[in-house]
Amino acid sequence: MSPRRPDISLNVPRSIPMTDLHFDNAFVRELPGDPSGGNEPRQVAGAAYSLVRPTPVAAPRLVAASPEVAAMLGLDPAAPGFAEVFAGNRALPSMTGYAMAYGGHQFGQWAGQLGDGRAIGLGEVLTATQGRQELQLKGAGRTPYSRGADGRAVLRSSIREFLCSEAMHHLGVPTTRALSLVATGDEVVRDVLYDGHPAPEPGAIVCRVAPSFIRFGSFELPSSRNDLDLLRRLVDFTIATHFPAIQSLPAAERLAAFFREVCERTATLMAHWMRVGFVHGVMNTDNMSILGLTIDYGPYGWVDDFDPDWTPNTTDRRQRRYRFGQQPNVAWWNLQRLAQALAPLFDGVEALQAGLDRYVEVFEATDAAFALGKLGLLDTRPGDEALVADLRGVLAAGGMDMTIFFRDLALLDIDAPHAGTVGAAFYEEARRVATQELLDGWLGRYAARVREEGSPEGERLALMHASNPRYVLRNYLAQEAIDWAERGDDAGVHDLLDTLRRPYDEQPGRDHLAGRRPEWARDRVGCSMLSCSS
Ligand code: AMP
Ligand code: MG
């Protein structure tokens, strides 16, 4: 059955001609740029970016667009020339082209200069309702930061980035957004499993949208070179442009408040990832947004059967540095790297240490609050921490589907709890039987806790439905949409985009998008095994 194709131009209320976009390219205007032009790979010192133009593509074709992002920008994806502009073949007046310079710690090691090797900024749009929004084409061709690579992106990973950005937003998780997904008509060669079998694949470009794409690594690079002037300018710019509340503080307090807020936002982000079962897969410091947004969707995955040790990234299979349960610790480690980079601007380490401590505090409080919300508990009582911790043990022991378990738990009869209510969450009958006693015990305790609280049933259900999505971008669903799209049928992409716009709603006729991962997808490439090759 071919899924329904929604009209992407629906729900775009006030579209204006594309030339009316109001650009204000503060990053390029206010920070120093690379004096040499061209896109030859090079080390770029003393500059926050290099000017570079997108390399035109053969035959741009709009595959999908986000109605909400288009509306935010005042754009109509059906407008003539839309695909050309967002493939980088045509520029609008006041658009510019630039690649940001940044460094990063990759898998625990300092990697030196990285930078936008295939992302090209088009400028910053001042929107009517969402302030400043930077547009960036991912896969737009080579830049000075491309090192040996081609500057391109393949359709499969572009579909994954496009869909997941929007899915995360609608789940309430801070994230960069995606305006459009354009097929380029060019082929891109990739060795999907790094096993010596490179093959041509269709290329694509996603237009990403965020207030800023500045990363932890943006600060690490000048700091690593002892370029304190650039470091200071970048920090001042970031605060003035993106942290207006901090900008208004006395100068002496600004830096500390900035680091503290980055720590707080990162903590909140980690709590969200744990809440919805998202595994980023490559939490290198160049993939950590200074605004606390999810950024750089690569070999990410969604937890199906609950397992804190799971990672979708085959490149990280041995070390599992970026496994699900490790993410809050990794973010803390990454914040330490950021603190180290910022340290030359501070008088002592106290304020930085205080920020890191604040991270732990905010993560623990937010994670605990989210956990209670998932259980529909309205207040906090002694024993709740153990109830939550023990549930994680039960889910892991049973290998139960996280999303289905929480969604179905709302239906539990709290006067006569029965394990059958959450039975659909089990993948294996043997594990169901083996976990029966543990699960019964936990459900009994949970039901007692709910009865003790005595909150109105409607309130508990509303809280649970708002905390536990019914629809997430299961890895195999994305892969099915990719398989169709690679054969020329974009309907799967449209259907998922449309479904994931309302992840907490029951959507009649879409049960097939809310079920367990099918057996065939357990170990299939793209479904549970992903590499950085994109
Ligand atoms: P990622 O793992 O996607 O965060 O990328 C790490 C670094 O490699 C960044 O500097 C990217 O810009 C760069 N990079 C990744 N893929 C490509 C590519 N196909 N062409 C050029 N640079 C790339
Ligand atoms: Mg990256």
Image: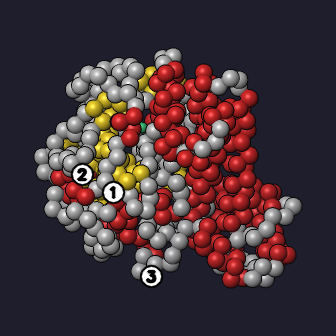
Do the numbered discs 3 and 2 sit on residues whose CB atoms are within 8 Å? Answer: no
Frontmost of labels 3 and 2 is 2
Dot 2: within a 10 Å radius of its alpha carbon, few (fewer than 14), some, or many (20 or more) residues?
Answer: many
Do the numbered discs 1 and 2 sit on residues whose CB atoms are within 8 Å? Answer: yes
Point out the tag, 3 or 2, that comes first from the N-terminus: 2
Q: Please, what secondary structure does the residue beneath circle 3 have?
A: loop
193 above or below 271? above
Dot 1: within a 10 Å radius of its alpha carbon, few (fewer than 14), some, or many (20 or more) residues?
Answer: many
Instruction: Please name whichever residue, 489 or 196, is drawn nearer the observer in this view of the structure.
Output: 489
Left or right, 454 with reference to 6? right
User: Could you tell me which quadrant the C terminus lies in?
Assistant: top left
Left or right, 300 with reference to 10? right
The residue tagged 2 is 86
Q: Which mark is residue 132?
A: none
Dot 3: within a 10 Å radius of its alpha carbon, few (fewer than 14), some, or many (20 or more) residues?
Answer: few
Q: CA distance from mark 3 to mark 2?
A: 34 Å
Q: Residue at x 43, y 62 (%)?
A: 129
Locate residue 299: give its quadrant. top left
Frontmost of labels 3 and 1 is 1
Q: Please, what secondary structure does the residue beneath circle 1 have?
A: strand
The residue tagged 3 is 508
